[in-house]
Every structure is written in C-alpha cells, then in structure tokens.
Image (cartoon, rainbow, N blue to C red):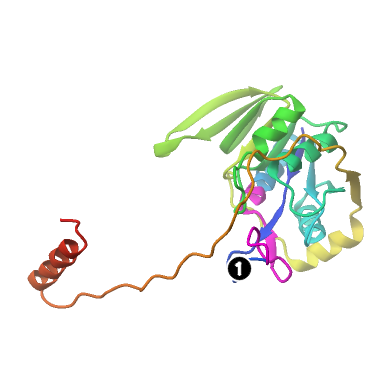
Amino acid sequence: MNIIVLIKQVPDLVEELELDSSGKDLDREWLKYKVNEFDDHALEEALLLKEEHGGTVTAMALDGQDIDKALYAAAAKGADRVVKITGLEGNPSNHEAAKAFANAISGMDYQAVFTGVQSVEDRDGQLPVLVAHYLGIPHVSVVSGVKIEGDKAVVYKEYGGGMMAELEVDLPAVLGIQAARETPRYVPVARVRRAMRSTEMEEVSAGDVSGAAAGSEVARMFKPETGQGAEMLEGSAEEVADKIVSILKEKGIV
C-alpha cells in the first residue's frame, strides 16, 4: 500500500496577522507557519494504514516558507520519502497547486493520495477533488477513517448533522481527510534533526500548470472591525429582563 500525502504550511493563527500593501494578501514577511491541521491528520491516517498493511508513505509539498522542516518532521514520524515540488512562485491557488501535485504524482507508483480536507487559508477548499480531477481517479472528501479491502477502500464520510456514511471506493483514489482515527503523533525536535541528517529531500518540478488558474480572485481583504464590547446588565432577574426588553425595543427588534 503506497500512499502519497500532500501537506502544506499555513499561517499560525495565534500570531497577529497584518495585511500587505496591496490589501489582497497577508504580510508574510514575519509570519510563523505550521503544518495545516487537516494535513497532519492525513499523514497520521496514512501512517496507521502503513503499520497495518505495509507499504510506503511519501510526504509531498510545494516549495515554500519552512516547508523543509515540515517534510523532515513527516519523515521523523514515519514517512519513507519526502518530495518537494519546485517552480511555483508566490502563493499559488488550489487549482495551480493541484495541477502541480498531479504532474509530480503521475509518474509515481501509488494506491492512494491523502490530503487535508481544507486549510485555514483556502478560498474554496477544493484541493482534494482538483487533484483527483487532474489524475483522473475517484475522490471522497470529509473522511474520518479508512479501511483497505483488497483493491478497494472503505471510507467513512461525514455529512451535515453528524450523519456518517460508509462508502466503498476503487483504488487508486484521492481522499480528503478530516480526522484520523487517532490523534496525530507527536515527534520531538531531536528526532526531526536526525531525520534532517538521514533523509534525502527529493525535488521535482511543478511542470506546466497553465490553464489551472482559479475562477475567482481576491479583490480586497479587511481586518475584522472591533466592536464596542459587551454590556453587562446588573440587578435582579426582573430588572435584567426589563433592561433586555428595553434594549430590544431601542434596536427595533420588538
């Protein structure tokens, strides 16, 4: 069972985010990055399947900020190969990224491609289905568990309202992972450093991604406006109730 896992670095949302001079993107000069949470779950699910069925796990990512560290961390967790895709400049759309991934994957031996169902900076969250489109293979997203049965995978897909469907999909396929069956494993810094010394970083070209531009573009980004804060109502239950009714009347709600 050879699984390719697509990972990316995303801005750490605990940091203060600022807009760049264009007003269309974040100022990324001093941003701290971390592995996209859903991609971390995709890697964990792949490693669990490798432990159950054998085979290999390949971690693959587009070249970018701190991506080498993320790939070496994947190797430290158990990935057998790490591949960096070069040649895409700036901050490519999901459509361009999907075409680049498909170009790199098309010459590899694999039975499944895993990636996170979305990331915190996605505008459309369609990377898994787009990769499947360019590879010409089936796709299932919002997956919360995978079982391998011969040349098929049984996947558990979550729908609205907490409903879970059990689907059977032919392999090879692309799966957008929402949650692994187990919490993603922790890897200490010392093990990542050992992986940096012992793991070969493979590089492949993104190839031709022309014609894969997104169907939308950012016109303007704005920081959320700061409100006036909460108004604390004091007094007895009857007094507080009267104040609430008065406020609702002032706002024309009742």
Query: In the depicted view, which residue is nearer to us: 101 or 189?
Result: 101
Q: Is residue 151 left or right of residue 231?
A: right
Q: At 73% from the left edge and 65% from the top edge, which residue is drawn?
A: 188
Magenta stretch, main secondary structure, is loop
Q: Is residue 225 left or right of residue 108?
A: left
Query: In the depicted view, which residue is nearer to us: 226 or 70?
Result: 226
Q: Secondary structure at mark 1?
A: loop
Q: Residue 106 appears in which quarter of the rendering?
A: top right
Vertical side of 31 occupied by 87: above or below: above
Counting every numbered tag in the picture gives 1
Indicate whether residue 107 is drawn in magenta.
Answer: no
* Residues rendered magenta in the picture: 21-41
Q: Residue 116 appears in which quarter of the rendering?
A: top right
Is residue 56 at least partly visible in the picture?
no
Q: Is residue 224 left or right of residue 245?
A: right
Q: Which residue is the site of mark 1?
A: 17
Indicate whether residue 33 is drawn in magenta.
Answer: yes
Is residue 121 at least partly visible in the picture?
yes
Q: At 57% from the left edge and 45% from the top edge, which residue is drawn?
A: 179
Q: Residues within 10 Å of mark 1 (few under 14, many from 20)?
A: some
Q: Residue 212 appears in which quarter of the rendering?
A: top right
The image position of residue 220, as x and y in percent, is 59, 56
